[in-house]
Image (spheres, rainbow, N blue to C red):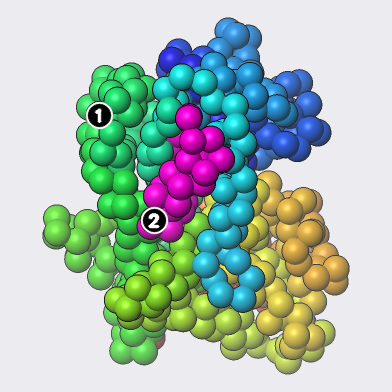
Amino acid sequence: MRVAMIGTGYVGLVSGTCFSDFGHDVTCIDKDASKIERLKKGEIPIFEPGLDELVRRNVEAGRLQFDTDLTQAVRDADVVFIAVGTPSRRGDGHADLSYVHAAAREIAAVAQGFTVVVTKSTVPVGTGSDLEHIIRDAAPEADIAVVSNPEFLREGAAIEDFKRPDRVVIGTDDPRAREVMAALYRPLSLNAAPILFTERNTAELIKYASNAFLAMKITFINEMADLCEKVGGNVQEVARGIGLDGRIGSKFLHAGPGYGGSCFPKDTLALTRTAQEAGAPIRLIETVTTVNETRKAAMGRKVLEALDCPPRGATVAVLGLTFKPNTDDMRDSPAINIVQSLLDRGVKVRAYDPVGMHEARKVLPDSVIYADGAYECAEGADCLVIITEWDAFRALDLDRLKTILKTPTVVDLRNIYPPADLASRGFKYIGVGRGS
Ligand code: UGA
């Protein structure tokens, strides 16, 4: 099949490349000429494990092209995906749909023959119907069906998630569009991935409901962690104990510094706004968003409380800055709040991240000092804080750390070390939700 993918951000580039790897003929389009030039040369603008190899392989096989102009690709396409950004609109927290609307108008102007237009971007319920009107106004003769096909990829595991999804959700009432989408995803049937056909509004809601539910799970276990710290108890065992109940499930129950990233904060906010305006407020998720924000600030206080010296003039070594491992993404990372609250109290912050330092420099204050490695970061510090659970931090040489830290204090916001190991070596160790 011929696919045009509009937007070569995270979702567009990963999805387009994976579709081409399944044998479809894909053109990825972006208005950013320098990005397209780089992609043509095989340079990948985002960090995603395995993506560079996959792009190279499919470009060489002639199945994956890049272009700045959508005209030809859309004309030839059976399916056109809209995978442009939907940032939070300033002021009201709604998703900003201006890029999505603009893409729909451009597609309508050039599409030929029956064309399925698919929203891959995360869009509020009702957007599919809006796009249909926009397209009808722009090109009354166009034979276009608008479908919702939300994505559930996780950064850092996106290729695996695309190729072995828990499910694919396709929202459409149009039988022709359904047939085209079924053919497009047929390669996944080998992996027995369930394909769920629904109405379009329902598909749009499934995306928000999924992210909101996951954010709620994380927030729940984070609050249980706080309770464990107050009354004594181990949140990891609580998570295991409840997660073994199949109705609850064990995933997304890792307590930590609060969720971040480009999706959960934005999508939970947008869902609450939609629900409020519809007169059906989802108070549970309103609370989740507030609790998560409060938590990020609380994590800064947790580090300050761990210090055995006055904050002013103390040095804190921070390991891990990105919102999670295997990405360079700093968007809404808890590290931003934690670092800021330390700096506000006069703490010197030295930081290291295996991949994210380039992005971190753009968002963290200039006073942050960057180290070339974990041990260089720890050298002479009054406290070591692990914010992101990169694999490279899981097996640090604890004896070496003990000798190079000025004070052997470790605040492990991801619970990657067994408290007993550190205690037996003479560290003051503070995890999340592991005892009082
Ligand atoms: C999330 C969803 O997991 C994807 O299914 C969805 O497609 C994506 O949003 C999206 O809407 O595009 P992502 O933001 O890449 O994916 O990252 P996650 O792995 O979900 O992690 C999000 C945040 O939650 C991170 O800050 C992570 O550290 C935190 N988290 C996750 C926890 O604190 N505890 C957990 O148990 C799991």
Identify the residue under disc 1.
Answer: 175
Which mark identifies residue 126?
2
Name the residue located 73 percent from the left edge and 58 percent from the top edge: 360
Q: Residue 109 or 73: which is nearer the viewer?
A: 109
Residue 307 seen in the current view = yes
Residue 219, percent across and down?
38, 72
The quarter of the image that holds ligand 1 is bottom left
In the rendered view, does 12 fall on the left or right side of 146?
Answer: right
- Is residue 398 visible from the viewing direction of this image? no
* Between 164 and 402, the one nearer to me in the picture: 164
Residue interval drawn in magenta: 117-142
What is the count of numbered marks? 2
Return the residue found at the far bottom.
Answer: 310
SS for tag 1?
helix
Do tag 2 and tag 1 residues touch (Cβ < 8 Å)? no
Sequence-wise, which precedes: disc 2 or disc 1?
2
Q: Residue furthest right?
A: 366
Give the left or right position of residue 179, taking residue 260 as reference.
left
For this orientation, the residue located farthest to the front is: 140
Distance between mark 2 and mark 1 Cα atoms: 20 Å
Q: Tell which of 114 and 22 is nearer to you.
A: 114
Which amino acid type corresponds to the residue marked 1 in the rendered image?
A: Pro
- Residue 234 is situated, as x and y percent measured from the top left of the image, at 31, 74
